[in-house]
Amino acid sequence: MKSKNIPVDIKSKSIKEAQNEIKEIIENLEGTETNLVESIDKYNRMMQLNYHIQEQFKKKLKEIKVHNFGNNKQSSTKD
C-alpha cells in the first residue's frame, strides 16, 4: 500500500490515535452485529491505519539514525 493511497484523515493521526482506532475496529469486528460489507470496509481502514503507523515508525527511525550518526561523527572528531 502506497502512502498516496492513505486517506488524509489517517495521515493526520498520531501513532497513538491510529492505534486507538485500530483497537476500536477490532472490538467492532469481534461483535456479532457487523455485516460483511461493513467488516470489509473496516478491515481495509485498519490496514491503512497499520500502514500509516509503519510509515511513522520508519520516519522516526530515520530521524534517530541521522541524530545518532551526527553525534557519533562529532564525538569521533573530538578524540
Image (cartoon, grey):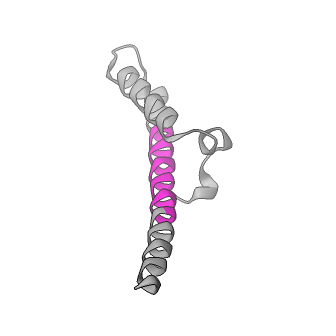
For the question of whether residue 31 can be seen, the reply is yes
The residue positioned 43% from the left and 24% from the top of the image is: 24
Q: Quadrant of residue 78?
A: bottom left
Highlighted range, magenta: 44-63
The residue positioned 33% from the left and 15% from the top of the image is: 32
What secondary structure is the magenta-colored segment mainly?
A: helix
Residue 49 placed where, x, y %? 49, 42
Q: Residue furthest top?
A: 33
For the question of whether residue 36 can be seen, the reply is no
Which of these two is toward me, 46 or 59?
59
Above/below status of 34 relative to 47: above
Which of these two is toward me, 48 or 32?
48
Quadrant the C terminus occupies? bottom left
The residue positioned 40% from the left and 21% from the top of the image is: 28
The residue positioned 47% from the left and 47% from the top of the image is: 53
**47 part of magenta stretch:** yes
